[in-house]
Amino acid sequence: MSRVYLVFTVLAISAVAVFAVQNRDPITVTFLTGSVEIPKVAVIIGSYILGMITGWGLFGLLKHVIKRSSSGHKKVMIETRVDE
């Protein structure tokens, strides 16, 4: 399974690299009140890295929530007896 993951990772990074090299034209990026002209390569690679970071963080958060929900909340059954 780890080799399959490695192959997909290498293919994805290769595809992003080829796409980035073919799109080197400068573009204007605007955020709030500021704007800057940077190459598309920087936007593509920056977006890819931010996506990896947020995806990794989201995966870790979901893993933590699932682990906590499965181990932290155990149902307790309470028996009551009525003496006659």
Image (cartoon, rainbow, N blue to C red):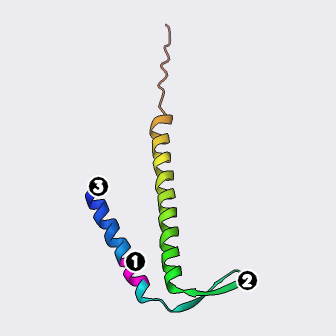
**Residue at coordinates 26% horizontally, 55% vertically from top-left?**
1
Residue annotated with mark 1: 16
Residue annotated with mark 2: 33
- Where in the figure is residue 54, as x and y percent of width and height? 52, 63
The question of residue 18 being in magenta is answered with yes
Please state if 15 lies on the left or on the right of 75 as rendered. left
Residue annotated with mark 3: 2
Per the image, label 1 sits on a secondary structure element best described as helix
Per the image, label 2 sits on a secondary structure element best described as loop
**Residue at coordinates 48% horizontally, 14% vertically from top-left?**
81
Q: Is residue 79 above or below residue 59?
A: above
Please tell me which residue lies in front, 30 or 25. 25
- The number of callouts visible is 3
- Where in the figure is residue 2, as x and y percent of width and height? 29, 55
Tell me the distance, in whole angstroms, between the alpha carbons under discs 1 and 3. Answer: 21 Å
**Residue at coordinates 48% horizontally, 52% vertically from top-left?**
60
- Callout 3 amino acid: Ser
Q: Residues within 10 Å of mark 1 (few under 14, many from 20)?
A: some
- Callout 1 amino acid: Val
Q: Are marks 1 and 3 in contact (CB under 8 Å)?
A: no
Q: What residue span does the magenta drawing correspond to?
A: 15-20
Please tell me which residue lies in front, 59 or 14. 14
- Where in the figure is residue 72, as x and y percent of width and height? 50, 35
Q: Name the mark on residue 45.
A: none
